[in-house]
Every structure is written in C-alpha cells, then in structure tokens.
C-alpha cells in the first residue's frame, strides 16, 4: 500500500487513524430476550452472551452498552461484579480464563433507546400514524438496545426473543421458531443459526400486510404497512429474478434460509441489508401513476446484493466499507444491464460518476480506503458507493468479465461467514489472474482523486496519419501518473476500427495510420475505464458524435454541445430529444438546450414538450424550461402542472421550474397545487421549491406553514431548506433554529442544509451545538463542516451572497445579449 495523496477537506486536524478493534475474546452467540413497551418507548431485556477467551489469564470482558440501566450481570447463575460508565460494561470475571475457555454472561437491563431502536408512534401532530418499532444497527447503534460487542470484525450466531403487544407482528433475522400468546402479549422467537456481524442483528415490529413466495426453495417474504398490500407487486415483483441473477452471476447460491423485505415509516435510510431481513423505507412503495417513472428495483437490487457483499462477507472495519457498499452498488448496475440492457447500465454508471464528482468538486477528496475519520458514518459517502463501483467496473474490463466473476466467486467462498479487507480482495485477484495489482489499488483505492485526461487530435492529410495527444491533468490531490488503457474508435467514410493504448505518463502522443480524414473519433466509447475525459473538439465533431452507436459517446456529445450557441446545435439537440433511441440521451439533450438559453432553444423545448411522451424525458424538458424567464415557458410549465395525466414527477419538476421563470402568475398556479396528492408528496415539494424561487413575501408566508409539525417529514425538509431563499428575514432564521432542535434527525439535517446555503454567521451557535452534541454522527460532521465554511468566509471578508447575486445578474444580461445576437443572425 503506497499512500501519497490523502486528499483535501475530509479529515479535520484533530482526526487520528482508526484501526480495527482487537478484543481478547470471541463472541460466539447472542441470545436477547426483550420485552418491548411500544407506547412507552422503552424495553426490558436479558442478553445472554456466549464468549470464548482468546488468551490465557483473561480477567475482564468489555461490552458495548449505551444509556442502559443495568440491573445485574451474572455468570453460571451467580451475580458477578462489573463497572459501567454509560457506554461500556466492564465485566469482572470471578476467575481468570485460559485460552479456549467458554463462558456465558447474562446481563439484565432496561433502556429507553435514543438510537438503534426507533419508536414511530401517533401523537397530536400525527394522529393517524401507525405504530411501529424498528432497528437500525449500522454502523454501531445496536449497543443502544442490546449489550454486545458492536463492531463488524467479529461474527456470531444470534437469537432474538421479542415480547410485544399481541396485535403486532415481529420480524427478525433467520428462522421463526415459535410464536406464543401470553395474555395481552405475544412472544416471537427468531434464530439466526449462521454467523453474522452484530450490527446486522435487526427487528421490525408493526401492523403489516404480508405475502410470501417460495423461489428455488427460499422463502421470499414481503411485509408492508397495513393497507398497502396492493403495492407489493409493483415494488417487489422482480425480487425472485434479482436473487436468481445474483446467485448465478456470483456463482454462489443465496446463502441464507429466507429473505424478508420489510417496509417501515420514517426509516432513517433508503434501506438496510440486515441478514435475511432488509428493512426499507415505505417511500419505495408506489401506486400505478408513480410507476410511470419511479422504480423500486435499484433499491431492492442494491440491498439484495448486500446479502452476499456485506452479510456473507463483511468488511473487517469501517475503513474498508467499500467491500460492502461499492460491491453492492456495482452489482445493482450489473443487474440493471441484465434487466434493461447495456444503455441503462452505462447510464447508471455515468450517474454514479456525476454523483461522485459533485462530492469531489464541491466538498472533499479522500482515498476510498482511509483511516482518517472520527465517526464511521463519515465514510458512507459517494467515494464508498459510486466511486468504488467505478473502480470495480474498471477492474472488470481490465481482467475480462469471465475472470471478474471467478474473482468474486473465489472471494465470497474464501471469506464466507467471515470478514475481509481490501488487501484480502487484492490477493484473491492476484491468485486468480497470476498478475500483480498493487499499482491498480494504489492509484484507485489507497489514494485520493481520479484520472482526468485532456485529449485532442488532428489529421495530417500529407502524412496520412491521425495524431492523438493525451495529457493527464488531474488535480494536485490525485495520483500523479495513472496507468490505464484507453480504447479509441476511429470512423471514416469506409472503415470503423478500434485501437487500444496504455496511458502511463503525464503526456503521450499516439499516431494512427489513416488513409482518409476521420468523420468521428470516439474515446473510451464503451465507458470501460474510470476517468474524466476532456475532449477538445468543435461543434461539428460533437454533432457527429451525437449520432454514435455508443450511448456514452452520445451523452458526452449532448453535454458538450451546451457550450455552443448556434442554430445548428439547437436543431441537432432538438432531434436528439425527440428521436434518440435511449431516453437518457434525450434527457441530457434537453438539459443542454436549457443551458444554451437562446430564443431558438426555448422554441425547440416547447416543440419537444408538445411531442415527447416519455415521462423521464419530459422531466428533462420541463427542468430545462426553468432556465427561461419567459412567459411562453411559464405558460407551458403551468399547463404541465395543471395536467393530472402527467406523471407526479414531471408535475413536480414543472412546479419548481415555474418558480424559476419569475412569471407574475406563477404564485397563483403554485399555491393552487400545493396540496395536490402525489407519490411521496413530490408535487407539494416541487411547489415549495418553486415558491422559494419566487422569493416573495406571499410565497414566504405559504412556505412557512409547511415547516411545521404535522406536515410530512420530507415536505417539512423542503420547506425548511427553502428558508435559505429568504436571507433578509429574521423569521426564516428562527425557523431554521427551531428545526435544529427537532426530534427527527432528518429535520435537523434540513436545518444544516439551510445554513449551508444561507451562510449566515447568526447560525454558527446552532451549528456548533449540533457538531458537539447531536446524537447523529453524520449530522455532527455536516454541522462542523458548514460552520468551518462560514468562518472561512468571514475571515476572507467576502460577501458571498452579494457576489452570487452579481454573477446571476451578469449571466442574465449575457443570456439576453446572446438571444439578441441569435435573432440578428437569423434575420441576416
């Protein structure tokens, strides 16, 4: 491992390296009997832990347990001594253990969990909320409701006996051994008889509709909130195919006794891959209209892939979390290829690259594997998800997919029911291929950044050769000189040929003999390598590339053409919106028309809106129309918002864009639809964002009402973030401050997001409080980061808000000037 580039802006100065924990014992089995007082938000439990000593003379055992009332600690039915500081139970053994000795420690306790186990209950603000209790252990939160060893690098079997009010259903890991009624209670006994990491122990308690199907001998179970049974098929119909596909692709059959998917309310994530019981947000459930352009399959496939990468083989520590997350992210994309074809697969990878680059360009850079962090949640980011997936995609193309699948199979079989890290994976690659891969991991995994290639080419008709120049222009925080293959396809009138060159130095020049001038030169046309390409070519070449057979080339062309404001470019982009065979290219072409921003681009988008029916493309069109402060755009957007035949998501996008047009009638249209029912309240959220763009006093008054308790969580989030659009209002600051105290961590996160946009020093005390005291590690980091950014701005004495406003004015004047020039050109 050769680390020379740690990145930038990720680790704070006080951060120290994180290394795996190494206790002197092995936890073999956890048996927890827990009585859940649902409406009191408390539990009474008894945890029996079987442990084996790993050394001679073991005299104490330390276990993780936060904010519990410990009633007693026993061994062999005898009370023994212990120390407890609110975080760790230090069990004092009555006699020292020798290596290999096994003991059972029984801890009797009570708790009102602040994390780890969540109680979702009706109250005066949400009287119709259906009661639920569910757990979320990752990363280290199961210690809030079960005393245990709470770190991923030790696996054990587990048993949960949950006693809950008899009207509730209880779902947990493994097999259901029994259900017994005891008066007003029911006792549910679940056994997980294969070892897994303790953060994957889980439970969900609620009033559920339930369906089950048996696929290849595996029970596939679906639990959804009562009354949502009709939505099961739309969300989970492809589960059998997903499980079969991964079993076949990985060469390792599904390794567990069942697979349950449980949808719960107010879940803190999209989904969590607990062993045999994935808990998902109920926001993935949707009706027929939402199904026009909303899919559950990406989430379902991602969490299912974790049953192999994350559960069967688990990262040894949080520094190597990409072993779980990058692999699941890439396998999700691979399943998409199986399901929808290669264009969808490539576009999924491009979307992942975009997401990573946003984080890299606007927030920080770090190695995929880093030990410099304070909280485990900090490494659950776009470096660990899409960037790592792109690294795996590059590896797949380097070794070939057949070999890649052998590598994955070998890795899973070698470390099944155990833990592994990046070096374990690298060694498996080298065992399978017989080649060294340290260079690959050094540049892509152990160091920050990514390759950026500046490419230009020129044809010499006298020498009859094509000269291609490639420069590595990545930033200082990246590896100095990457080594990667670059495929180039050269198309002339008569021939289409593919060439492959290795990029190994900062600057390289390649020559290709060519009898005639190329019509098109495509670089990495199949998107085989993780690199950012900066291709220097004119609009004519990009227009030709827009007609390439490879979707990656067409998307690069659609995006690049946004820089050229000409009638021909507008016409070609319009044709791509209306006629390209893949919706993703059409969507990108529509966005580029919006960025061009001239009169002809507006007319093109309006024509596309009348013609194109695909809802995802229509989302791109209405989004692009938001770039025009023009009554024609506004009227078209208001018609989309009014049309109940449109998809929820198209109408939501139209609402936000309508606000951006600043049309004088926009307010009336937006307010009319603020309570229009839609999937996950997306129309309401779009209207709130549109009103925020208007920025008027009457808009503020409306938005303010949607920040209040009683409104759906994600509606409140949108409204609180929208407060940042009203920087002069003291009441907006007060609303953000109040949101920072909310019980719901998502609402507190919205307060931080608003502060990040507002950049007001008045919010520094709030941010500092969250950074030092909040229960959520992720919010602590975010608050600290925003506070640091504000302080830096104060030190520089730069008026960021005024500067942004001035830039917007200049942009608007520039748009008008270009529009006038385009009209003059047309007349001439």
Image: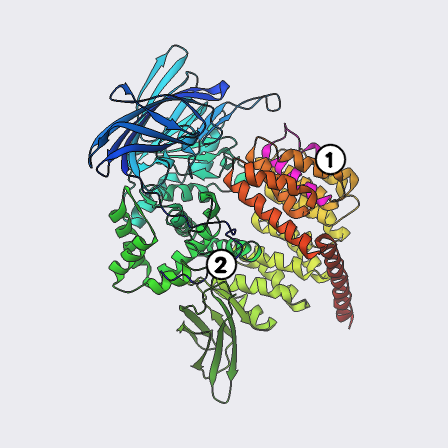
As displayed, is residue 486 above or below residue 301?
A: below
Quadrant showing the C terminus: bottom right
Q: Residue at x 43, y 25 (%)?
A: 68
Q: Between tags 1 and 2, which lies in front?
A: 2
Give the CA separation, mark 1 to mark 2: 43 Å
Quadrant showing the N terminus: bottom left
Total labels drawn: 2
**Display colour scheme:** rainbow
User: What number is the disc on residue 658?
Assistant: none
Is residue 614 shown left or right of residue 99? right
Instruction: Check the image and name the residue furthest to the top.
Output: 183
As displayed, is residue 246 above or below residue 578?
A: above
Q: Is residue 719 magenta?
A: yes
Give the quadrant of residue 175: top left
Range of magenta residues: 701-726
Q: Which residue is mark 1?
A: 702
Mark 1 Cα shell of 10 Å, populated few (<14), some (14-19), many (≥20): some
Q: Position of residue 593 (x, y in %)?
A: 65, 59
Front residue (pair 212, 717): 717
Q: Position of residue 756 (x, y in %)?
A: 63, 47
Q: Which residue is mark 2?
A: 7
Q: Residue at x 50, y 52 (%)?
A: 11
Mark 2 Cα shell of 10 Å, populated few (<14), some (14-19), many (≥20): many
């Amino acid at each position: 491992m050769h680390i020379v580039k740690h990145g930038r802006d990720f680790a704070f100065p006080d951060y120290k390296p994180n290394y795996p924990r190494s206790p002197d014992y092995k936890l073999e089995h956890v048996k927890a009997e827990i009585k859940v007082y649902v409406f009191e938000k408390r539990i009474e439990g008894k945890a029996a832990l079987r442990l084996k000593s790993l050394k001679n003379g073991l005299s104490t055992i330390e276990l993780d347990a936060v904010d519990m009332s410990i009633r007693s600690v026993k061994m062999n039915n005898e009370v023994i001594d212990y120390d407890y500081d609110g975080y760790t139970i230090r069990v004092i053994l009555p006699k020292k253990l020798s290596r290999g000795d096994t003991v059972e420690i029984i801890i009797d306790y009570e708790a009102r969990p602040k994390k780890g186990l969540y109680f979702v209950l009706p109250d005066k603000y949400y009287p119709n909320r259906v009661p639920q209790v569910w757990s979320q252990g990752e990363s280290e939160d199961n210690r809030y409701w079960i005393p245990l060893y709470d770190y991923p690098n030790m696996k054990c079997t587990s048993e949960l006996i949950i006693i809950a009010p008899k009207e509730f259903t209880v779902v947990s890991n493994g097999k259901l051994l029994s259900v017994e009624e005891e008066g007003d209670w029911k006792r549910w006994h679940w056994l997980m008889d294969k070892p897994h990491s303790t953060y994957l122990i889980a439970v969900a308690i609620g009033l559920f509709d339930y369906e089950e199907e048996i696929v290849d001998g595996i029970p596939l179970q679906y639990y959804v909130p009562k009354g949502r049974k009709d939505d099961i098929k739309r969300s989970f119909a492809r589960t059998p195919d997903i499980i079969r596909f991964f079993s076949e692709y990985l060469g390792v059959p599904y390794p567990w006794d069942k697979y349950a998917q449980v949808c719960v309310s107010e879940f803190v994530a999209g989904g969590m891959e607990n062993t045999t019981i994935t808990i998902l947000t109920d926001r993935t459930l949707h009706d027929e209209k939402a199904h026009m352009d909303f899919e559950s399959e990406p989430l379902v496939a991602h969490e299912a892939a974790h049953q192999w990468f994350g559960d069967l083989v688990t990262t040894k520590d949080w520094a190597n979390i990409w072993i779980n997350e990058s692999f699941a992210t890439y396998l999700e994309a691979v399943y998409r290829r199986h399901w929808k074809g290669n264009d969808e697969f490539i576009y999924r990878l491009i979307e992942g690259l975009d997401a990573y680059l946003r984080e890299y360009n606007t927030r920080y850079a770090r190695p995929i594997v880093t030990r410099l962090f304070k909280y485990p949640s900090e490494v659950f980011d776009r470096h660990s998800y899409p960037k790592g997936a792109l690294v795996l995609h590059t590896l797949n193309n380097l070794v070939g997919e057949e070999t890649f699948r052998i590598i994955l199979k070998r890795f899973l079989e070698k470390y099944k029911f155990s833990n592994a890290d990046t070096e374990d994976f690298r060694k498996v690659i080298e065992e399978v291929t017989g080649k060294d891969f340290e260079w690959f991991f050094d540049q892509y995994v152990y160091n920050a950044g990514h390759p950026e290639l500046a490419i230009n080419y020129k044809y010499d008709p006298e020498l009859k050769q094509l000269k291609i120049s490639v420069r590595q222009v990545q930033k200082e925080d990246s590896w100095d000189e990457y080594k990667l293959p670059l495929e180039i396809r050269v198309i002339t009138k008569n021939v289409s040929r593919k060439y492959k060159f290795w990029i190994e130095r900062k600057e390289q020049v390649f020559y290709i003999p060519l009898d005639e001038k190329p019509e098109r030169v495509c670089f990495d046309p199949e998107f085989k390598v993780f690199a950012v390409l900066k291709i220097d070519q004119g609009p004519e070449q990009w227009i030709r590339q827009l007609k390439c057979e490879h979707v990656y080339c067409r998307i690069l062309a659609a995006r690049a053409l946004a820089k050229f404001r000409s009638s021909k470019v507008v016409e070609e982009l319009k044709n791509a919106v209306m006629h390209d065979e893949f919706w993703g290219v059409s969507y990108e072409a529509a966005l580029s028309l919006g960025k061009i921003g001239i009169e002809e681009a507006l007319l093109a988008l309006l024509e596309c809106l009348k013609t194109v029916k695909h809802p995802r493309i229509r989302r791109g069109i209405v989004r692009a129309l938001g770039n025009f402060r023009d009554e024609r755009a506004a009227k078209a957007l208001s018609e989309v918002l009014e049309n109940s035949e449109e998809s929820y998501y198209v109408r939501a996008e139209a609402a936000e864009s309508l606000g951006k047009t600043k049309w004088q009638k926009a307010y009336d249209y937006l307010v009319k639809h603020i309570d229009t029912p839609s999937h996950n309240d997306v129309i309401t959220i779009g209207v709130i964002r549109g009103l925020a763009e208007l920025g008027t006093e009457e808009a503020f008054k409306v938005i303010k009402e949607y920040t209040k308790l009683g409104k759906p969580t994600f509606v409140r989030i949108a409204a609180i973030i929208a407060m940042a659009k009203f920087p002069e209002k003291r009441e907006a600051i007060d609303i953000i401050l109040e949101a920072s105290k909310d019980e719901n961590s998502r609402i507190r996160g919205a307060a931080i997001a608003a502060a990040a946009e507002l950049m007001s020093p008045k919010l520094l005390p709030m941010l500092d409080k969250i950074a030092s005291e909040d229960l959520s590690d992720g919010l602590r980091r975010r608050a600290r980061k925003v506070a640091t950014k504000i302080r830096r701005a104060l030190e520089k004495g730069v008026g960021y808000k005024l500067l942004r406003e001035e830039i917007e004015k200049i942009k608007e004047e520039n748009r008008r000037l270009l529009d006038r020039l385009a009209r003059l050109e047309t007349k001439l």
